[in-house]
Image (cartoon, rainbow, N blue to C red):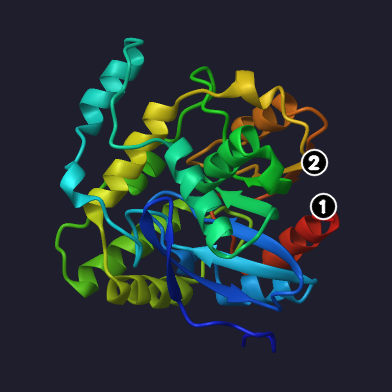
Amino acid sequence: MMRNVPHTEPTSVNANGIEIVYDTFGEPTAAPMLLIMGLGEQMITWDEEFCAALAAQGYWVIRFDNRDVGLSTRLDEAGVPDILALTQAQEQGQAILAPYTLGDMADDAVGLLDALEIESAHVVGVSMGGGIAQMMAMYHAGRVRTLTSIMSSTSDPDLPPPSPEAATALVAPPAQTDRKSHIEHAVRGWRVLNGPGFFFDEERIRERAGRAYGRGLSPGGRVRQLAAVLATGCHKHVLKTLAIPTLVIHGDADPLIPVDCGIDTANTIPGAELMIIEGMGHDLPPAVAPRVIKAIARHAV
């Protein structure tokens, strides 16, 4: 049951030359908090109850579809990158060409703030969204009041890789494109990513996957976003210069972005606080939400 806080209908605005769809929770007079989602996921992966609970802490919470997913602009004209070729180029130290980078996606987020006439916001990113949030802090520091990076990384190539099962869950497409196949594929993938310390709520995943299917899928967009991650690469040298209050949250059972990546992020950003959650994988299940919300609210002041 969603808390009794104002929730707007999805709205489209022009941001950085593309259309971004967003919605909000809470009062516009409260301190703005921008939530940035991860690879291939729509804004609804930020559970409504999570957003409402954050808003109840005194924030105007904004979630949005990144470019190439959900209802925001899709760049299908850019084609579908060859991820294997890009990965091989990365391993050989060659330059990686992609339709866009995480820096471009950070520009999208700043464009959304512009459209909403927000000078600066508390910025919270999860997984790839954590990388986008880091880019905002690095290149648009005046727009970021505080940074919270959840289950993300500096992309240092020396860090541990995903488990084979998690890597497959990230990139393998469903066998069919119908609604039922999409939902079953989502259940299998999120079961792999779920940590051993928290109940796997299959019904929650099924409901969310069905809603995502109804909003529209973008398989090519997911690949382009992954190419953006590869093209952006390691950015530790810039993170070392940050002067923005930073909170890093990571699960110690994350099979996709191992906990060493979160530790490395916290060690790289000056003065960053590190919060490791025992038993948490690469998801924010409802049972962990109160602890994460409390940490973000304590940090985002």
Q: Are marks 2 and 1 in contact (CB under 8 Å)?
A: yes
Q: Whole-percent x and y of residue 281?
A: 56, 50
Amino acid type at circle 1 is: His
Per the image, the residue denoted by label 1 is: 299
Q: Residue at x 21, y 57 (%)?
A: 174
- Residue 178 visible in the shown view: yes
Q: Whole-percent x and y of residue 81?
A: 21, 36
- Where 258 sits versus 96, above or below? below
- Where 286 sits versus 292, above or below? below
Quarter of the image where one finds residue 271: top right
- Decide if residue 18 is on the left or right side of residue 271: left
Which of disc 1 and disc 2 is earlier in sequence? Answer: 2
Q: Nearer the viewer, residue 28 or 293?
A: 28
Q: Residue at x 51, y 44 (%)?
A: 106
User: Badge 2 local density, few (<14 within 10 Å), some, or many (20+)?
Assistant: many
Q: Secondary structure at mark 1?
A: helix
Q: Residue at x 35, y 43 (%)?
A: 225
Quadrant including the N terminus: bottom right
Per the image, the residue denoted by label 2 is: 245
- Decide if residue 269 is on the left or right side of residue 262: right
Q: Nearer the viewer, residue 255 or 77?
A: 77
Q: Residue at x 29, y 42 (%)?
A: 224
Quarter of the image where one finds residue 33: bottom right
